[in-house]
């Protein structure tokens, strides 16, 4: 893999979508949400929430994570 600097919410969403699609591309699941260890189900709800108690809790980014705080 390659490291990436993620500077926007759109870039983050694209990365998350790519990761969610990995099991589908490898033929391990028909849909992203079918893969047991996928966090895709977490993102289906509004607001997102944990789907299965036995899986690690997803906290997500804090509100404003991509807002600039400097004057650049």
Image (cartoon, rainbow, N blue to C red):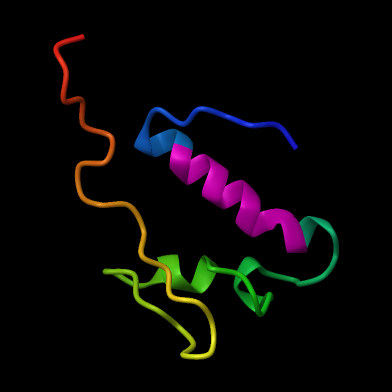
Q: Is residue 58 left or right of residue 55?
A: left
Q: In this view, which residue lies farthest toward the bottom?
A: 53
Residue 70 relative to residue 5: left or right: left
Q: Is residue 53 magenta-colored?
A: no
Image quadrant holding the C terminus, namely: top left
Eyeballing the image, is 17 above or below 71? below
State left or right for residue 10 relative to residue 56. left
Q: Which residues are magenta?
A: 12-23
**Image coords of residue 26 (percent x, y):** 84, 59
Q: Is residue 9 left or right of residue 41?
A: left
Which of the pair 29/19 is nearer the observer? 19
Residue 20, given in percent of the width and then of the height, sits at 62, 58
Q: Residue at x 37, y 31 (%)?
A: 8
Q: Quadrant of residue 58?
A: bottom left
- Which residue is located at x 20 percent, y 42 percent? 64
Residue situated furthest top in the rendering: 72
In x, y percent, where is residue 68? 20, 25
Could you say where residue 65 lies in the image, as x and y percent from the top left? 26, 41
Snapshot quadrant of residue 9: top left
Quarter of the image with the N terminus in it: top right
Instruction: Please report the residue visible at 45 percent of the width from the left and 83 percent of the height from the top.
Output: 51
Q: How many marks?
A: 0
Please name the residue shown 50% across and 73% down the image.
41
Question: What is the quadrant of residue 43 in the picture?
Answer: bottom left
Task: Please say if 61 is above or below 36.
Answer: above
**In the displayed image of the protein, which residue is found farthest to the right?**
27
Q: Main secondary structure of the magenta part?
A: helix
- Give the vertical position of 66 relative to 32 (above or below): above
């Amino acid at each position: 893999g390659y490291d990436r600097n993620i500077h926007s919410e759109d870039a983050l969403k694209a990365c998350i979508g790519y990761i969610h699609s990995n099991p589908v591309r490898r033929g391990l699941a028909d849909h992203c949400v079918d893969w047991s260890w996928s966090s895709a189900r977490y993102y289906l709800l509004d607001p997102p929430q944990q789907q299965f108690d036995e899986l690690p809790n997803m906290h997500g980014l804090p509100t404003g994570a991509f807002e600039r705080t400097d004057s650049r």
